[in-house]
Image (cartoon, rainbow, N blue to C red):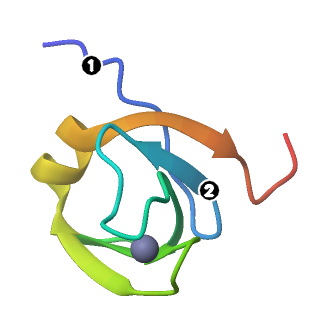
Amino acid sequence: MRTTIPRIDLGDIVRLRKPHPCGSFEWEVVRLGVDIGLVCNGCGRRVLLPRGKFNRRLKAVVKKASGE
Ligand SMILES: [Zn+2]
């Protein structure tokens, strides 16, 4: 099955479908693996999301760490 999920790298800034309770939609990717580690750009809270859940919540990659 083809997927349209964008490639994610460490340091990328991503936007999720739902805001964090602090009001921010944007997160920095700090860990890649079975779980995806994210740090909220609004309040600095760190969370781990299972990859499947992360993929469903991901709306867009805002900024690539590589500067693309
Ligand atoms: Zn937050």
The numbered mark, 2 or 1, whose residue comes first in the sequence reads 1
Q: Position of residue 47 (x, y in %)?
A: 28, 81
Which residue is the site of mark 2? 13
Report the side of 11 relative to 47 (left or right).
right
Q: Is residue 1 visible?
A: yes
Report the side of 47 relative to 9 (left or right).
left
Q: Position of residue 40 (x, y in %)?
A: 48, 73
Q: Position of residue 61 (x, y in %)?
A: 57, 39
Q: Tag 2, which secondary structure?
A: strand
| 27 in relation to 63, above or below | below
Q: Quadrant of the N terminus?
A: top left
Rendering quarter of residue 56: top left
Question: From this viewpoint, which residue is outermost toward the top?
Answer: 2
| 1 in relation to 36, above or below | above
Looking at the image, which residue is at 23% across and 78% down? Answer: 48
* Ligand 1 has an atom within 8 Å of the beta carbon of the residue at disc 2: no
Question: From this viewpoint, which residue is outermost toward the right?
Answer: 67
Question: From this viewpoint, which residue is outermost toward the bottom?
Answer: 45
Q: Is residue 31 visible?
A: no
Looking at the image, which residue is at 47% across and 51% down? Answer: 25
Q: Which of pointers 2 and 1 indicates the residue nearer the eye? A: 2
Q: Position of residue 3 (x, y in %)?
A: 27, 19
Three-letter amino acid code at the position of disc 2: Ile
Report the side of 31 relative to 1 (left or right).
right
Which residue is the site of mark 1? 3
Q: CA distance from mark 2 to mark 1?
A: 20 Å
Three-letter amino acid code at the position of disc 1: Thr
Looking at the image, which residue is at 63% across and 58% down? Answer: 12
